[in-house]
Image (cartoon, helix red, strand yellow):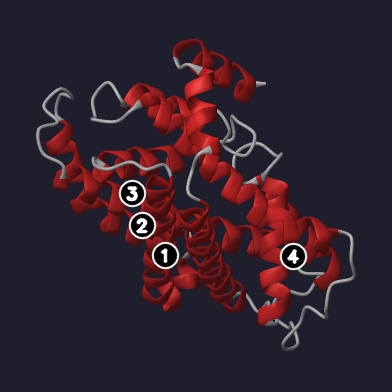
Amino acid sequence: MLSGIALYFVFRIVDPNAIFDAFFSSHPGYLLLAFVAFNGSKIVAAFRLNRFYKVIGVYLTSRYNLLLYYIGMFYNLFLPGSVGGDAYKVFLLQEQERARTKPLLLATLLDRVSGLAMLALLTFGLILLREDLTGIPYLYPLAWSGLLLTIPAYLLLKRIVFTRFMPVLWPTFFLSFWVQLGQLICAYFILMALGIQGGYLDYLILFMVSSVVAVLPFTIGGVGARELVFLYGYRFLVIDESLAVAFTFLFFSTLAISSLPGLAFSFSPLPAPSGAPISQIKKS
């Protein structure tokens, strides 16, 4: 419902015809490159999640883990925020592997936290690269504070809440960098597909901010949330509001098309999940 309300406000302010014209006139070659970059980032993200699962004794084959990740992506399309698919992955592993729920939830939650920490770090960095944003009070001091405090806060949270995952702290955080870099490359190619000639940094900043907002469990698949971020962000940054909304639609289309294999995997037999015996978190 909130997604529909958000889109209603977007289309009241921005001319829908201008959005659809930009959408359907986008360059297919750049969209293909965006598709490749997006899926590359998701493959790395699946590998990162598997590292967390191994810490709690859940040993999944690379193939099964990747299929499971795409199933989660598919369910995220119509479940609130981007966490519904994560919950479904936990459910499947609990049923098939008879593993306890709490360790699975912690591993899956930490995977999200790791991604969000890197997302925040890169967002603050991009903001500091952008000059002349004096229209937003205290933006640069806040960005500097965020840049300096994100990693210590992440370390502290992991030490307090996710202690058992400390051995894979830096390898997984490094993987998070490549995940977010893949997302940025995907966004860049979508901008190229729309024929946008300049102001890339402004669009990428809003893209990163919208990625944080899209995770919140208020909209379906992030639809509406991204559009609102871009719509109100153009007041402070040099972007075209029609192209910005077309960008969000193209990004969601890339996500939706990439998630289609998850639909097929949901209704077909999956391969054997375990790459090794699960001994640490079996149900009693």
Going from N to C along the chain, the mark reached first, 2 or 1, is: 2
The residue under label 2 is which amino acid type?
Answer: Met
- Kindly indicate whether the residue at mark 3 contacts the one at mark 4 (C-beta within 8 angstroms): no
The residue under label 4 is which amino acid type?
Answer: Arg
Q: Secondary structure at mark 1?
A: helix
In front: 198, or 75? 198
Q: Position of residue 12 (x, y in %)?
A: 51, 10
Q: Residue at x 49, y 27 (%)?
A: 19
The residues tagged by marks 1 and 4 sit, at their Cα atoms, a distance apart of 26 Å
Q: Which residue is mark 1?
A: 176
The residue under label 3 is which amino acid type?
Answer: Ala
**In which quadrant will I find the N terminus?**
top right
Q: Which residue is mark 3?
A: 120
- Kindly indicate whether the residue at mark 4 contacts the one at mark 1 (C-beta within 8 angstroms): no
Going from N to C along the chain, the mark reached first, 4 or 3, is: 4
Q: Position of residue 99 (x, y in %)?
A: 77, 69
Q: Which residue is mark 2?
A: 118
Q: Residues within 10 Å of mark 3 (few under 14, many from 20)?
A: many
Q: Position of residue 67 (x, y in %)?
A: 72, 69
- Outermost residue toward the top? 12
Left or right: 277 as drawn, with respect to 107: right
The residue under label 1 is which amino acid type?
Answer: Ser
